[in-house]
Image (cartoon, rainbow, N blue to C red):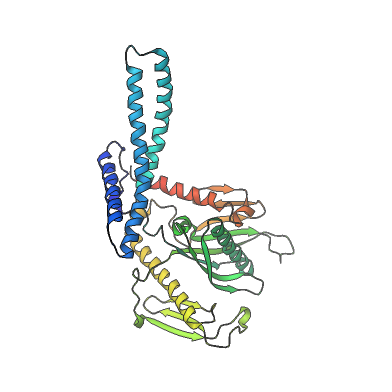
């Protein structure tokens, strides 16, 4: 939803005229969509805005209904000559509704918060082994599979785009495309350094080692988002190889694309077709360039960035997975879950993500008071 339709400052009574504008905009959009002929992109944009406003309008309607009922019940309680039993019932119902009203108001304020324009997009997931050698690579593989399982639980499509595997089954780097409803909105807080504390299988003394992997979640970019000139690209083709340099293809189907102005390099070799590898590499390159553009824009909005959960900086340690204690701790919000196996299975990851989203919303609401 555009920022034009979102304003959560002050009490809702103070901005009731603004809420009426939101309801009016929703009605106007409904009429346009029902009677107009649009290009596909324009219809998709208007339909998205209409769907987002529908949720807000429903909450505004419920809030207004509860307020009207509260006024009616308060009048009954204050009325002289009213039956005592009726007054008692009205007083009980009034107390219930007055307790419910703040929750409805908070829900509307949250719905009115400016929405990240990328929230509804699909995402590119990149997981890389950090410090810790082979153990870090094994942990990177665990994280990648965690997100794959999580995607399955939400009915998202998870497409493995590139995996650089080690001899022991770890991942030096793994990239996937994830498509579905609100993918980026739910995964964007996963970007950062994830740390693991456990005893490696190769550790004879039983000592706990600490390793790390980095996760980057990038909103998928459309061609219209990022203009890439052919003259800015250097494209090299080479023969695909497997772990340890083992050749897996007898033709030069692997592709390496260098974006000269930024120095960003993307390689793809999973497909046997050079054309398909180039298309995948361009998709990743476009997402990385779009992410860089967003980061530069966000840096210019330092004041609003302070209201975000964490800085989003991928050098920031965001979470620790401690196997001896069976716990996962998210350091940004101080949340600890003693269910590490369920988190890594993707089953309990929603508990962390929901808490991060709630913290982000609360921080932004507080900043707008």
Residue 29 rendering spot, x and y as whole percentages = 29, 52
From the viewer's perspective, tell me whether residue 308 is left or right of residue 239.
left
Residue at the far right in the pictured view: 204
Q: Residue at x 33, y 45 (%)?
A: 368
**Vertical relation: 31 (above or below) 66:** below
Question: Number of labelled discs?
Answer: 0
Residue 70 rendering spot, x and y as whole percentages = 35, 27
Residue at the far top in the pictured view: 81
From the viewer's perspective, tell me whether residue 179 is left or right of residue 133.
left
Residue 95 lies in what quarter of the image? top left
Q: Out of 90 and 298, give the one closest to the viewer.
A: 90
Residue 343 lies in what quarter of the image? bottom right
Residue 14 rendering spot, x and y as whole percentages = 27, 37
Residue 315 rendering spot, x and y as whole percentages = 48, 62
Quarter of the image that includes the C terminus:
top left
Q: Out of 148 and 238, give the one closest to the viewer.
A: 148
Q: Residue at x 39, y 37 (%)?
A: 104
**Vertical relation: 104 (above or below) 315:** above
């Amino acid at each position: 939803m555009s920022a034009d339709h979102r304003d959560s400052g002050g009490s809702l009574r103070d901005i009731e005229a603004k809420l009426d504008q939101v309801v009016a905009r929703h009605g106007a959009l409904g009429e346009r969509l029902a009677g107009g002929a649009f290009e596909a992109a324009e219809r998709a944009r208007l339909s998205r805005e209409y769907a987002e406003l529908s949720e807000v309008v429903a909450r505004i309607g419920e809030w207004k209904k509860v307020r009207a009922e509260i006024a009616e019940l308060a009048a009954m309680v204050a009325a002289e000559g009213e039956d005592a039993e009726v007054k008692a019932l009205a007083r009980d119902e009034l107390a219930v509704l007055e307790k419910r009203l703040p929750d409805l108001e908070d829900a509307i304020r949250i719905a009115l918060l400016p929405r990240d324009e990328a929230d509804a997009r699909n995402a590119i997931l990149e997981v890389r082994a950090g410090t810790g050698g082979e153990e870090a690579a094994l942990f990177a593989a665990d994280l990648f599979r965690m997100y794959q399982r999580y995607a399955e639980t939400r009915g998202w499509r998870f497409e493995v785009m590139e995996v650089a595997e080690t001899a022991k089954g770890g991942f030096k780097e793994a990239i996937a495309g994830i498509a579905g409803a609100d993918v980026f909105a739910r995964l964007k807080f996963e970007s950062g350094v994830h740390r693991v504390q456990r005893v490696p299988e190769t550790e004879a003394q039983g000592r706990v080692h600490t390793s790390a992997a980095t996760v980057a979640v990038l909103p998928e970019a459309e061609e219209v988002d990022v203009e890439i000139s052919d003259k800015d690209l250097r494209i090299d083709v080479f023969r695909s190889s497997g772990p340890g340099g083992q050749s897996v293809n007898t033709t030069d189907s692997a592709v390496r694309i260098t974006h000269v102005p930024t120095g960003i390099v993307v390689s793809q070799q999973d497909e046997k077709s050079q054309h398909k590898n180039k298309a995948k590499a361009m998709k990743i390159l476009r997402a990385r360039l779009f992410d860089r553009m967003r980061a530069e824009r966000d840096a210019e909005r330092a004041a609003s960035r302070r209201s975000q959960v964490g800085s989003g900086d991928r050098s920031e340690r965001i979470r620790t997975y401690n196997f001896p204690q069976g716990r996962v701790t998210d350091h940004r919000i101080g949340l600890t879950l003693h269910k590490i196996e369920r988190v890594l299975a993707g089953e309990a990851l929603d508990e962390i993500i929901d808490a991060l989203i709630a913290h982000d919303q609360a921080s932004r609401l507080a900043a707008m008071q």
